[in-house]
Amino acid sequence: MAKESSPQRVVQAAIQSRSFAPVYYLHGDDEYLKDAAVRDLLAAAIDPGTRDFNCEIRRAGDLDAEAVSSLLSTPPMLAEKRAVVLRDVTALKKAARHQLDVYLKRPAPDTLLLLVALAGSKADSALASASESLEFAPLPPDRVRRWITHHATSVLAVSIAEDAAQLLQQAVGNDLHQLASELDKCASYVRGAPVAVPSSPATDEALNSTITVDAVSAVVGIRRGETTVDLLDAVAQQDAAAAVTLVAHVLGQPKVTAVQVVMMLSTQAFALAYGRARRDAGIPTNRLPQEYFAFLKETGGYPGRPWGEAASAWTKVTEHWSAAACEQALARLLEADHALKESTVSNAEQILLSLVLALCGTRRRRAA
């Protein structure tokens, strides 16, 4: 029984009301959000004093039919409710899955069953219809920015400056696991001591510790003006000198690859081609931000930053890009993508340097 609300809101509503569905099916590609939901549901529903007796967390592929039947038929011990977590639930063998399907027709009211699917697995319609189905899709970039602020204040009991959150996202990307890890380090840095996750809401005194841009730079090892977004902007502005200088900085960042950069540059080039076409069709410049936002929503492209920021940046440079320049840029991007995946001669930095020079050269060629 799918919900219109976000899965996080469904979970929080259940926790606040102390009213839990007997079965939750947690699926989707964001493992961090799924793990957080499992953790929150277990903490709220199961008495911590009897958790050792009343909480079973198992991998579905390791269970036979008898084990599944035993797990689901065991009553709570010295408590009102017990919990069973089956991870990678679609890996259940046929007989074990049959036992689960039988149970789902009449789930026990004193058992909280959490069925967790791996990222990338196809949603199971039978499980979804027999449970509270919660799909945890990756957060869009705009929501990731809000998540950074929320996690810092509610979990780590520190505040974070807006420009610091922006720099952290530009440096780390949208991986919540990695962002949580870097935020924890930043909180330790600004406090000057290891961070203990608070068990109660953050106090005003605790929030006097603020993660600043300088703290992010010190911990993550990246400075303003040297991020992937800065490279994207330099290429969009066709500033070859700045773009060439930034390539080494960007490729030196953790978990940033040349293929990822080419993907973001490709999203930008497609967007600029779309914006150029809309301008040529008579759409005024002040309408372009909405046009770009609609483009991203329809295509699902990853621009490397929140959609609103990307739309604003592209609007400022659309007039510098002709339809021919956009076409040339896309051709160069395709060549670079093939070279990065197939070439054994040039290294990634050389390929990316050649690419940004070619992209930034479109203005000069057009002017000539």
Image (cartoon, rainbow, N blue to C red):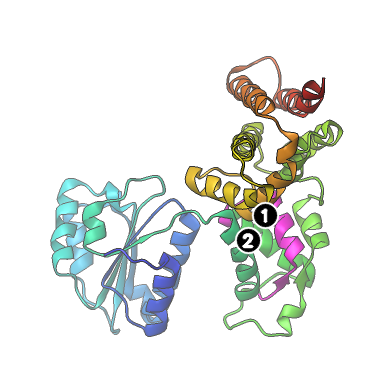
| Circle 1 SS class | helix
Are the residues at dot 2 and dot 1 in contact (C-beta closer than 8 Å)?
yes
The image position of residue 174, as x and y in percent, is 59, 52
| Left or right of residue 367, residue 127 in this image | left
Within-10-Å neighbours for mark 1: few <14, some 14–19, many 20+: many
**How many circles with numbers are drawn on the protein?**
2
| Circle 2 SS class | helix
Query: What residue is rendered at 74% in x and 41% in y?
Result: 317
Can residue 252 be seen?
no
Within-10-Å neighbours for mark 2: few <14, some 14–19, many 20+: some
Q: Which mark is residue 44?
A: none
Name the amino acid type tagged 1. Gln
Using the rendered view, name the quadrant where residue 278 is placed. Answer: top right
Query: What residue is rendered at 68% in x and 47% in y?
Result: 285
Per the model, the C-alpha gap separating discs 2 and 1 is: 7 Å
Magenta range is 157-176
